[in-house]
Image: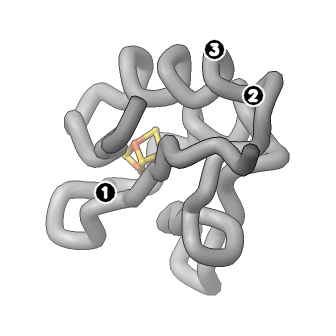
């Protein structure tokens, strides 16, 4: 079955620190201002759950949200 974990970058909180993309380039992309957003609909592929959690833990703005199990 597909993973049901989803990441989301809160655009009101993101300040472009770029740690998320450095830690999990498969899950994040940057816009023209250097702020991050999730790739696609944010579904975390199997095997990348730890990277997603790491990215959330390392965002100094607490902008990375992780939902699901
Ligand atoms: Fe933004 Fe946090 Fe990533 S501030 S660029 S979501 S590390």
Looking at mark 3, is its residue's CB closer than 8 Å to ligand 1? no
Q: Earlier in the sequence, mark 1 or mark 2?
A: 1
Residue nearest the observer in this picture, 23 or 52 = 52
Q: Can you identify the residue that label 2 sits on?
A: 48
* Residue that extends furthest to the left in the rendered view of this protein: 12
Residue nearest the observer in this picture, 2 or 56 = 2
Q: Are there few (<14), some (14-19), or many (20+) residues within 10 Å of tag 2?
A: some
* Residue that extends furthest to the bottom in the rendered view of this protein: 32
Residue lying at 19% horizontally and 57% vertically, measured from the top left: 13
The number of discs equals: 3
Asked if the residue under mark 3 is in contact with the one under mark 2, i.e. CB atoms within 8 Å, the reply is yes
Q: Can you identify the residue that label 3 sits on?
A: 50
- Does residue 12 sit above or below 52 in this rendering? below
Q: CA distance from mark 2 to mark 3?
A: 6 Å
Q: Quadrant of residue 20?
A: top right
Assign a secondary structure to mark 3: helix
Looking at mark 1, is its residue's CB closer than 8 Å to ligand 1? yes
Residue lying at 66% horizontally and 55% vertically, measured from the top left: 28
Q: Can you identify the residue that label 1 sits on?
A: 14
Asked if the residue under mark 1 is in contact with the one under mark 3, i.e. CB atoms within 8 Å, the reply is no
Residue lying at 41% horizontally and 29% vertically, measured from the top left: 69
């Amino acid at each position: 079955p597909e993973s049901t974990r989803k990441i989301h970058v809160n655009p009101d909180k993101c300040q472009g620190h770029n740690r998320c993309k450095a830690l999990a380039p498969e899950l994040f992309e940057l816009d023209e201002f250097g702020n991050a957003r999730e790739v696609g609909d944010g579904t975390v592929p199997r095997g990348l759950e730890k990277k997603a959690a790491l990215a959330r833990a390392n965002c100094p703005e607490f902008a990375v949200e992780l939902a699901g199990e």
